[in-house]
Image: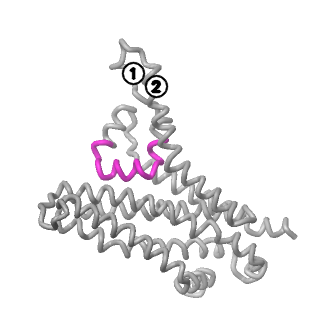
Amino acid sequence: MMERFSNPVLMKELKLRFRAFKSFSGLMFYLAVLCIFVAGFLLIYTQFSGTGFFKPSDSFMMFSILSVLQMGLVMFITPGLTAGAISTEREKQTLNILLTTTQSSTQIIIGKLLSSVVFLILMLVAGLPLYSLVFLFGGVSPSQFITIFLFYLVTLIAIGSIGIMFSTITKKTIVSMIATYGAMIFLAGITAFFFFIGVSMEQMSAQPGNMQNVTPFSPITYFWVSINPGALIITTLYPEMASALESVVGISLPIWIVYLIFYILITAICLFIATRKLRANMKTNR
């Protein structure tokens, strides 16, 4: 029974990844960034004396900024781990050998994805001691803490799936990495740009004498902000902002539900394309 669910590709990738020096150097860089931020934040709020009073509101502010920063790091690191998963095998001319094994396309794709996800989860877990500092000063509930990490998990799996897909359909790792980072720029930056543009255009088109009866922005504009990872973190930490967005657009569907639906669909579509194109590309190359 265990052999049926075993994935040799996953086990091989995990051994190679955790034996590589660059993996632990990346982990060190990740923790260094978090340590610098936390230390700097504490020093500033205690006026560089180490004896200042740190209020629960200050602790919540640190947790909020740290959550947004960690989401940014997840979106920055994940493409580097997944965008070359298949294209690197192709460049090393080892993909043909991998495809001649008894492993199915699904097992290969899932194994490559999970090896990156496991390492990213390790990074999140390694940063937990820094996050635990906020509980010393109060201001943050365990439910908020767990919710934020669940959204991290959904986001990194979706980004990893995008990277795996581009790595499968492109022949060069550099092309795959550029495409994956382009997708990250769209999700993190372009969606926010579309949101602000939509709000500005609809407010400009509103009649000055009839402002009370005009909806500030449309469901399309609401969609752009709903799939933005930064907006999700902010509205999760500050529920009143999410309620305000829902009230002005007239939609009772919370942002986090739209976010989950969108990123789960993205994950499923990208993995489906990667699975279908893995062996199709090899047939074309032959």
* Neighbours of disc 1 within 10 Å: few (<14), some (14-19), many (20+): some
Q: Nearer the viewer, residue 262 or 171?
A: 171
- Give whichever of discs 1 and 2 has the lower sequence position: 2
Asked if 133 appears above or below 246 in the picture, the reply is below
Residue 233, magenta (yes or no): yes
**Alpha-carbon distance for marks 1 and 2?**
9 Å
- SS at mark 2 in the image: helix
Task: Point out the image quarter for the C terminus.
Answer: bottom right
Residue 231, magenta (yes or no): yes
Tag on residue 214? 1
Q: Nearer the viewer, mark 1 or mark 2?
A: 2
In the rendered image, residue 12, in percent from the top left (x then y), is placed at 61, 85
Main secondary-structure element of the magenta-colored stretch: helix
Q: Name the residue under label 2.
A: 202
In the rendered image, residue 99, in percent from the top left (x then y), is placed at 75, 78
- SS at mark 1 in the image: loop
Residues rendered magenta in the picture:
224-241
Q: Quadrant of residue 48?
A: bottom left
User: At 27% from the left edge and 58% from the top edge, which residue is drawn?
Assistant: 62
